[in-house]
Image (cartoon, coloured by chain):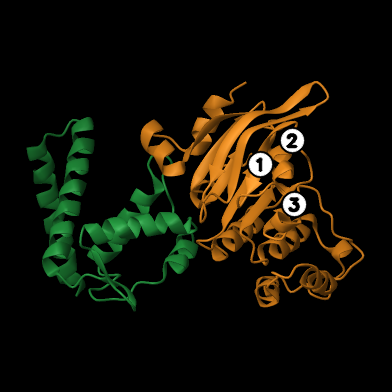
Amino acid sequence: MAILECKGLTKKYGKKEALRQIDLQVEPGRIVGLLGPNGSGKSTLLKICTGLLTPTKGAAHIDGRKPDSKTKAIVSYLPEVPYLNDWMKVSDIVAFFRDFYSDFNLTKALDMLRNLSIENQVLKTLSKGTKEKVQLVLVMAREAKLYLLDEPIGGVDPAARDYILNTIIRNYNPEASVVLSTHLITDIEQVLDDVIFLKEGEIVLDCPVDELRESKGMSVDAYFREVFKC
Amino acid sequence: MAWIFTSDRPIYLQVQEKIKLSIVSGEYPPGWKMPAVRDLALEAAVNPNTVQKALSELEREGFVYTQRTSGRYITEDDMVIKQAKNELATELVRSFLGKMAAIGFSPAEAALLIGDKAKEVDGNGDTGM
């Protein structure tokens, strides 16, 4: 059964339609890229899947259920804006997550944070890139079934990007799926199974990366530039 | 370091070719136990499913085999490796001849040039020893 399924999903902000009739399925064990320019509806879609927003029409189902407290227990979400209290020490936040989420894998988190050697630092003193790494580690250290990552590689340097991609590959689990939104495709393309292109709230493409490369003879990045040329 | 991929072809095919090259060159010797899918994926910095697909293809072609409980191994069949080596060499020669043709050399002229160059390299090899 699909871990994530959207049927006729529509979201309006007042008169503006942010999402229009979205139908999609994400099977277990897939890493899916949600790609689209700014304002195409990526974050809105992820927020509906987490239950932070309610759809105007249609529905998103996580493991067969509409978003509720049970689905929240199996969904690990990385929002695009930082939400951690920045007066806390990294070690405090890790403890906080361990208390809050029953599926939090402490060993895994400490293991991933070790290379950064920042345990005793206060979050406020960390650089933007390091903060983003910490957030991603916390999110990926949960043994969730669905990881929803909103712009995980947004503002970080290439080395940090490698660290983040590495973290995603390292935590790969055939039972779980990852959906990540981004507009920086080049760096992430080889980590993805499938890509979904969103354009003005509609899906214009939903297919496996290698299938696209095979049929178009170009990278997803090149194809993206073609579809979204302005 | 992550492996380098070209952008115009499926990634699993490129992973498959890279592993095949490692087998033919002896970097992955016959009978060698391959790293786990996840470790290969990390090394190549690609999706584990992509590595899995490449390995399944290699298995279908007889380059690797799976021992049910202990993992995946490189084939010990010399014929398979030798044949792959010949195919690879043929492909290289074909592409070389294509490039030579583009700058106005016929295959015969190209062969002549290779003969000369080969003598030179052999000669250097002898005196160098």
The residue shown at (53%, 40%) is A195
Q: Identity of the amino acid at label 3? A: Asp
Most extreme residue toward the front is A65
Please determine whether, in this image, residue B105 is positioned above or below residue A51: above
Classify residue B37 as left or right of residue A118. left
Tell me which numbered mark, 3 or 1, is placed earlier along the sequence: 1
Q: Give the letter of the chain under mark 2.
A: A
Quote the CA–CA distance across marks 3 and 2. Answer: 14 Å
Q: Identity of the amino acid at label 2? A: Pro
Give the residue pinned by disc 2.
Answer: A55
Q: Secondary structure at mark 1?
A: strand
Question: Which chain: green?
Answer: B
Which image quadrant is residue B49 in? bottom left
Callout 2: 10 Å neighbours few (<14), some, many (20+)? many
Give the residue pinned by disc 3.
Answer: A68
Q: Are marks 1 and 2 in contact (CB under 8 Å)?
A: yes
**Residue A203 drawn at (x, y percent):** 58, 30
Q: Are marks 3 and 2 in contact (CB under 8 Å)?
A: no
Asked if marks 1 and 2 fall on the same chain, the answer is yes
Quote the CA–CA distance across marks 3 and 1. Answer: 11 Å
> Would residue A152 be seen by someone viewing this image from the given angle?
no
Colour of chain A, in one word, is orange
Q: Secondary structure at mark 2?
A: loop
Which image quadrant is residue A227 in? top right
